[in-house]
Image (cartoon, grey):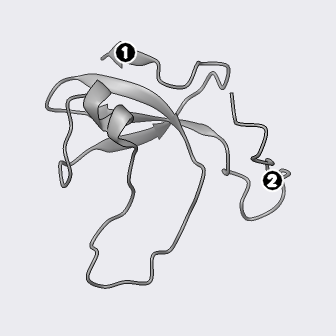
């Protein structure tokens, strides 16, 4: 669940995806972890060439490390528990 301190944005705003769950997939290990979108950019720093990031726990769960190429997709069942790991 989204922590109580986080308020979800209503649908219809440009930030509708805030708090939604996504799978982060690691093609190298064929594992994916359910995570949530809790902040967004764009990051205005040309020195940091990143599209997205994940917690150390999420990265460890799928056997990923910084700068690995990962795939992101929506979790179709938003009732999935954060941190769930699946093989695909």
Q: Where is 76 relative to 15, above or below?
A: above
Q: Residues within 10 Å of mark 1 (few under 14, many from 20)?
A: some
Left or right: 11, with 2 as reference point: right
Name the residue beneath numbered marker 2. 9
Q: Quadrant of residue 47?
A: bottom left
**Total of numbered circles in the picture?**
2
Q: Quadrant of residue 4?
A: top right
Left or right: 20, with 52 as reference point: right
Label 1's element? strand
Residue 66 drawn at (x, y percent): 20, 51
Residue extending farthest to the top is 87
Residue extending farthest to the front is 5
Left or right: 11, with 18 as reference point: right
Give the position of the N terminus as an image quadrant: top right
Residue 45 or residue 51, whichever sits in front: 45
Q: Residues within 10 Å of mark 2 (few under 14, many from 20)?
A: some
């Amino acid at each position: 669940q989204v922590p109580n301190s986080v308020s979800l944005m209503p649908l219809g705003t440009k930030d509708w995806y805030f708090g939604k769950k996504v799978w982060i997939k690691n093609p190298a290990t064929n594992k994916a972890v359910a995570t949530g979108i809790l902040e967004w950019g764009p990051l205005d720093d040309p020195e940091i060439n990143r599209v997205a990031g994940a917690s150390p726990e999420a990265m460890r769960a799928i056997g990923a490390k910084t700068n690995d190429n990962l795939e992101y997709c929506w979790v179709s069942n938003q009732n999935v528990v954060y941190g769930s790991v699946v093989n695909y």
